[in-house]
Image: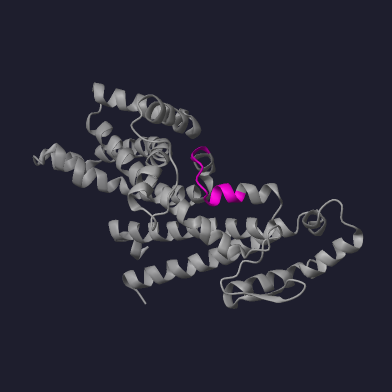
Amino acid sequence: MSGFAGFALRRSVSAVLTLLALSVIIYVVFYATPGNVAQITCGPRCSPEQVHQVAQQLRLDDPLYLRYWHFLQGIVVGHDYSTGTSVEHCPAPCLGLSYQSDQQVTRIILNKLPVSLSLVVGAMVLWLLLGVGTGVLSAWRRGRFTERALTGLTLAGVATPVFVIGLVLMIVICGQLELLPFPEYVSFSDDPEQWMWGLLLPWFTLALAEAAYFARLTRASMLETLAEDHIRTFRAYGVGERSIVGRHALRGALAPIIALNANDFGSAMGGAVLVESLFGLPGIGQELVHAVTVVDLPVVVGMVLVIGFFVVLANALADVLYAVADRRVVLA
């Protein structure tokens, strides 16, 4: 199979293999580390007999490869877990049961996922608009006051921690100017309008921090493209500067922007914990920190794997978009 379909198929197979390798690494890193998981799960006051009973219930005495195989089986076909008095079926994709709450990890993640997706997707739209727009304007106005002012703003954005941006926005907009109420998350299915108002400040907080990086990258890429020979040829033939910047220089700068956006989207799914904590958003990042604190390994492994899935998926989509923007990639 050749052409774009073959390219998409190769990237899909590569993404699946990457996820499989990622699952092995994550499982070994978390389950092969020293420490008595059964003792941690049971608590410090448990007797050795109780700890042994918990280890048997969680099948921690099985070899590591066998536990990983059961983990993969759970993802593909589901798994049955003994709760002591009954058997609970965990349907596929099953990522195990929480050591602390006995809830299915998949359900925990599905409950948190809409919050994180709402935050990251909305912020991504804003950071692309603000970052790429600022970068294009800086490159277009090179050497003028506009470029120096925007460069100063982007440097300030890079240097300012995300929680400081969020705190300042909350104090100024909600506290002093009273333009918005203090953010409170409302599900989109319950009230779409309140959902948007509740996420407005978290969106801008995350977007302003990321937009600074996109502005600097876009400006640098466009200045590099504007210095190339074919741009000078366009100018010699009388092509307008607006057309050169908008149609030719921006297209040449798209590849690094797409790559950076793919990485940032995936990492923000679990890395936006500061924004989630600051605004009280019950998302994946906040739940992951809690699971690490109480050593709830099935939840930690499941969430890290889901975050890795989004990173791989975003990069696969970025490859496809890159191929659409530049057909030479398909032939490579």
Labels in figure, total: 0
Q: In this view of the protein, which residue sits in the foreground, 131 or 326? A: 131
Q: Which residue is pictured at 19% across the width and 47% down the height? A: 247
Residue 244, by quadrant, is top left
Q: Is residue 58 left or right of residue 329?
A: right
Please state the extent of the stretch shown in magenta in the rendering. Answer: 278-288
Which color scheme did the rendering employ for the protein?
Answer: one colour
- Residue, x 63% and y 72% (percent of image)? 72
- Residue 157 on image: x %, y %: 41, 30
Where is residue 320 drawn, in percent x and y? 36, 61
As drawn, 79 above or below 331: below
Q: Residue furthest left?
A: 238
Q: Quadrant of the N terminus?
A: bottom left
Identify which residue, 181 or 137, lies in the foreground. Answer: 181
Does the magenta-highlighted stretch encompass residue 31?
Answer: no
Quarter of the image where one finds residue 63: bottom right
Q: Residue at horizontal 25%, vertical 38%? A: 226
Q: Main secondary structure of the magenta part?
A: helix
In this rendering, position of residue 61 left or right of residue 313: right
Asked if the magenta segment contains residue 286, the reply would be: yes
Is 330 on the left-hand or right-hand side of 146? right
Report the side of 85 relative to 246 (left or right).
right
Spot occupied by residue 236 in the image (x, y as percentages of width and height): 11, 38
Residue 108 at x, y = what percent?
57, 60
**Outermost residue toward the right in this view:** 48
Which quadrant, please, contains the C terminus? bottom left
Asked whether the viewer can see residue 256, the reply is: no
Instruction: Looking at the picture, tell me which residue is in the foreground, 83 or 318.
Output: 83
Is 244 located above or below residue 116 in the figure? above
